[in-house]
Structure formats: C-alpha cells, structure tokens
Image (cartoon, coloured by chain):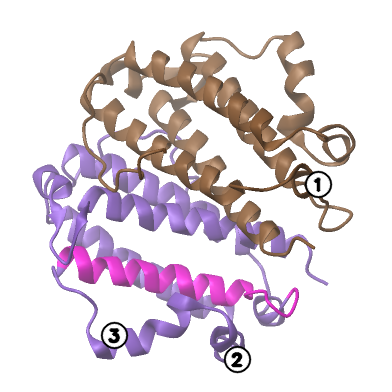
Chain colours: A purple, B brown
Amino acid sequence: MTPPPSLRIEPIPGYSPTIGRLVGMLTYSRSTTLAAVQGVTMAQLDHLHDERSNSIGALLAHICVVEQSYQVLTFEDRPLSPEENERWATALTLGESGRLTLRERPLEHYVEQLTAVRQKTLDGLAARDDAWLEQAVSPAPRINAHWAWFHVAEDEINHRGQIRWLRSRLP
Amino acid sequence: MTPPPSLRIEPIPGYSPTIGRLVGMLTYSRSTTLAAVQGVTMAQLDHLHDERSNSIGALLAHICVVEQSYQVLTFEDRPLSPEENERWATALTLGESGRLTLRERPLEHYVEQLTAVRQKTLDGLAARDDAWLEQAVSPAPRINAHWAWFHVAEDEINHRGQIRWLRSRLP
C-alpha cells in the first residue's frame, strides 16, 4: 500500500529546506496523477476521445519526458542533444505522431517509467541546495531551477486535469 | 499591457521569503489561466462541449470560489459559514446546477472577480510570515497553510488544462 500523500508542504529530511518544500509539491502532484489512472486498462490508455485528442497513455508518456528534459536542463546544464530530441520529440509534442505510436503499453509500463524518472529527480534534488535552486538554468537563462521544477509539476497537473476529463468519458 | 510573467521562483519584496516563492507560483499559474481565456466571447464562455461538461465560464467561477474558500479557511481560521456554503456551492461543486446558472456573464466579469479575490489573497499573504505558512490550518488540521495555497494553484492549473482542451474544440 502506498501511504496517503502528505497534505503539508514543509522541509523534508534529506533535502535542503526550500528543495524539500518543492519535493512535497512534486510528490503530491504525482500522487494525484497516479490516482487519476489507477486501474485503467491498455485499451483505455490507448483510447482517442476524438480525432484531435491525445490518449491518456500519451499524456503519461508526455509527463515522463517533460521531467526527463528538465533533468537534462537543470542537472546536466545543457540543452537536449539531437539524439534526445529525436527520441523524446513524439511524447514532448504529442499530436498526430503520438496518436500513431504512443500505444499498446500497459499501465505498469508508464508507472515504472514515471517512477524511475522521478527517482532520478529526487536523487538530483537531494544532491543540491537552496542556492542552486534559485540560480538561472544555464541553457535557458530566463528561468531559474525553482521555476523549472515548479513547471514540471504544473505541466503534470495541467495534463492530469485533462486525464480526469478524458477518463470520465471513456466508452 | 500586462508584463510577461516571471519565469523565476524566488523571494519577492513585500512578502516573507517562502511566501514570496509561493506568490510567484500563484501569479505564474494565474497568468496562464488568463492567457488561456484571452478573447473568448460570452457565447464561448457558456458553451457546453457535451451534456456533462462544465463551461469555460463555470470553470473560471470555480477557480474564484476555491480561492475564496481557502481565504476563509486560512486567513479567518474557520470553516465556511452556512451562508458562504450556500452562495458558493454551485461554483464549488459544478455539474448540473452550474450548467444551468453559471451563464451569461462576459469575460470581464470573471476577470474582475478573479482579480479582486487575488488581491485579497496577496494582501493576506503579505500580512503573514513563513512560520504561519507552515502551521496547520485550524479548521482542517491535516493540511498546513502552505499546502492549502499550493492546492489553490494546483486546482486552478488542473482546470486550466481542461479550459485549454475545451477552448481548442469550441465550435
């Protein structure tokens, strides 16, 4: 059993104080994403509500590669490589290509990927401090690392809203 | 012209440091909500995508009363009064009653309400400190004030995701 998500934002042991508060937000947001897809079948993950919709599975793949992209930007201090861009482009941009290729994967596939990517985020954040969090992201100097990681949660929550909407209308 | 939203989360003059970071998140989230509805007509605000959909206008009304409710919980340290519950219930719960009554208001109505309510939030947060932010919310002691205000942003972002989806499918 996964414990219920904390409904407190506060410092967390193992992280510097402001990073800990951010981790609380990322963790709470993820718990709501996983709750939104609990028990969906592969056919439901692949279902297209209309001809322009992303499937729930494609949105989960998108949530995963957004997080991976911000790991590269903030932990490795570099833009995506051409190879990463090519590998992640479909899930980053979604749309027609995603409708064709992000399919036929069971829920466990997405949950395992999300969990592995999140662990790498938590390890990276645990190794850094609050001064780092406030610094500009060198390959994207208009943003700082704190905004970058807030945005990872924010993009996930945005798509979770869509997942809830889509799930409540599955055939 | 509204200035472009800051893409940095950091302390903000006029707020204690952690509250300032939270205000940055609330402000960024709100800027994306307003961008998502810029230029929509009253007919578009009232449009129902299907018989179970909330209109974009109803979602804006919901965003507004969620924020008002958390003002009561965290700034006034009390649950909603029966009178507030009655006044806000339709926008808080949405659904059938919202489809019938949250209608025929132009975008300016919603933007004015959102702006007035937000100003009250900013005034309330400016008058408090980081120690307050971490304290439990007395009428809902499982949550602390920081989670409460993160949740206000999170719920708004969730519905902004739905607003974007609905707007892209307006007739």
Q: Nearer the viewer, residue A170 or A92?
A: A92
Judging from the image, mark 2 belongs to the subunit labelled A
Q: In the rendered view, would you say B35 is above or below A94? A: above
Q: Which residue occupies 48% across, 47% down?
A: B32
Q: Which residue is mark 1?
A: B43
Which residue is situated farthest in the front direction here?
B1
Three-letter amino acid code at the position of disc 2: Leu
Q: Secondary structure at mark 2?
A: helix
Left/right placement of residue A107 relative to residue A148 reads right
Left/right placement of residue A21 relative to residue A7 reads left
Tell me the mark number nearer the camera, choosing from 1 and 2.
1
CA gap between label 1 and label 3 equals: 43 Å
Judging from the image, mark 3 belongs to the subunit labelled A
Q: Which residue is mark 2?
A: A100
User: Which comes before the other along the chain, label 2 or label 3?
Assistant: 3
Q: In the rendered view, would you say A78 is above or below B53? A: below
Three-letter amino acid code at the position of disc 1: Ala
The answer to whether residue B74 is seen in the rendering is yes
Within-10-Å neighbours for mark 2: few <14, some 14–19, many 20+: few
Quadrant into which the C terminus of chain A falls: bottom right
Q: Which residue is mark 3?
A: A84
